[in-house]
Image (cartoon, grey):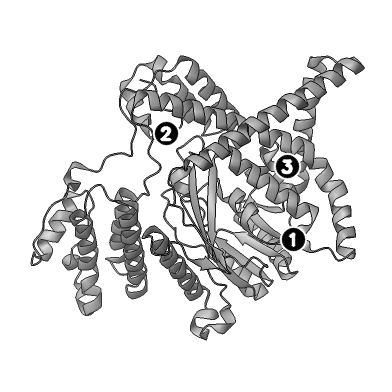
Amino acid sequence: MLPNPFHYRRAPGLITKNYFRSWPFSIHVASSSFLPSPCRTLIDVVLVLLYFCVGKLPSEPQHEPSQDKSMVRRKTDTDSSAADDAATATSNGVNVPSPASSSASASSSSKGTLPARVQALQAKATTLPQPLSNVAKCALYYEAEMLWQMIKDELPAEHPDQASLLAAIDQFETKLLHISPAQLATTSFQRILQRLDMLLRVITCSLYLCLLGVITFLPMITLVPVLDRLLLILGWPRRYLIYEFAKKASARGFLYLAGVFYTEEGKQHNGYETPLVLLFQHGSNLDGFLILDSFPQFFKSIGKDDIFLMPYVGWMAYVYGILPIDRKHRNEAIKQLGRATRVCASGVAIALSPEGTRSKTGQLMRFKKGPFYLQAETSATITPLVIIGNYELWPPNYFFTCPGQVVMRYLPPIDPSSLPPSIGRNKDELSRYVRKQMFEAIHDIMAGSGEGGEEGGKKIKKYAPGGKLTWWLRGLNLTCMCLFWLMVKAAWVMVTGASDAYGFSRGALAGGFVAYTVSVTAGLYILYCRAPAS
């Protein structure tokens, strides 16, 4: 059977298949090692189209990789010894150092209990119902991260047990605590419908971004700034400027066509005081569109420079104020981060992920130091944003997002100057404080403890993060796609009619379109991303 192109975790099975049936994924793996993002995307689209033409449906449902056979639920006595816990953890494939691995660990009682606590945490995972739910995984991940930080604090770097204990926790998190994505269909007929639906949404959203970039790029960098400046002079509210309307409309249009709907909690609809640093949990490619549509005021964000190599997507990234950063070269990245610092100090909100990159597991990864250096230099307020359900809908190994619902929770703004000096003036402690607040919000959402309620006199409905769409929302998604294709048909009739009237051939139109796309993309990347950062 061929692998599902939207679920690459079936790739290991290709080793046992013949070469003809494994060529789509083989090309994908080979191209991902040396080609840039735009080329990989183009190759993936071609492979998916070929796959749908010649591929066969799998004979069994595609789920997350099953837990290790030794991870079945087992009953343990409450008075079991530490040796039994260690044996249980070892049977799960995670090696945990013994407390007696070094005589230096006996010098402190707290140091001596750390290996036992690691073993107890791993044994706790075996007593829970299997397979672990996402709620249980989030709770265990929080405990593991707190224990990881305790080991870092209490054991010096030269301690013989520190590296092995940290590695044991990392292995435990990687092996067991991945957030489970949205389940794919289980029957053959449902899988056919699901694939056709996903293929239709991929083509629709790709064409939407293409037309959006071609139609709006030049007006957004020429006419709109002039018109918005005139409106500001006349006293027009900034949140109702043409730029803000276009930004939210384009992001919401993509989400509606992709079938992703969200609910938001805790947002200050009248905006936030600046300077402001918005720290969001980055678990999916959907995050940029969600924040563009949701955040109530003008902001700029930081993104990797590879985005600007993608035609149309890079154009809109430039229009909507994404500041490129070269993550491959540290010195250049520091200079580019300095540009973001100056933008934030000028009174513009900056949105960035403290994790530094998209999460590969769906969990809140450990924070980088860059955002907190930016905050310290600008004395900005920090607003954490937790996004739940985005990873479940579009994890890294899915070709495109599944339709579903997302929950966004804005936490209360944190003014470091109002915190105790031991936290507010210490970047490491401030990072831990913010991360703990986000962990608590994640647990609250996943446990469903914040359902319903009212905010500012407005009733809030709580969607299930990562859950399926209601029939009404699904109907809205399909209606938006139908309207979009009607607009595309009308635009095509207009363009072809104009070309026939002026005597242009279809080949000339296609060649001019390709030349325009390549020249704008290359020029934007060279002038905006490769320009030396001062």
| Amino acid beneath label 1 | Arg
Residue 50: x, y in percent? Answer: 51, 18
Q: Real-space Cα distance between discs 3 and 1?
A: 22 Å
Residue 7's disc number: 2
In this rendered view, identify the residue nearer to me: 485 or 121: 485
Q: For mark 3, what is the residue?
A: 315
Residue at screen point 54% across, 37% down: 475
Pick the residue in front: 497 or 324: 497
**Quick check: 322 above or below 427?**
above
Alpha carbon of mark 2 to alpha carbon of mark 1: how far?
40 Å
**Residue assigned mark 1:** 239
Mark positioned earlier in the residue sequence (2 or 1): 2
Identify the residue at image location x=56%, y=50%. 287
Q: Amino acid at mark 2?
A: His
Q: Secondary structure at mark 3?
A: helix
Q: Secondary structure at mark 2?
A: loop
Q: Amino acid at mark 3?
A: Trp
Label 3 Cα neighbours within 10 Å, binned few <14 / some 14-19 / many ≥20: many
Q: How many marks?
A: 3
In the figure, is residue 69 to the left or right of 207? Answer: left
Q: Quadrant of residue 89?
A: bottom left
The local secondary structure at tag 1 comes to helix
Residue drawn at x 59%, y 51% as measured from the top left: 290
Q: Nearer the viewer, residue 247 or 474?
A: 474
Q: Earlier in the sequence, mark 3 or mark 1?
A: 1
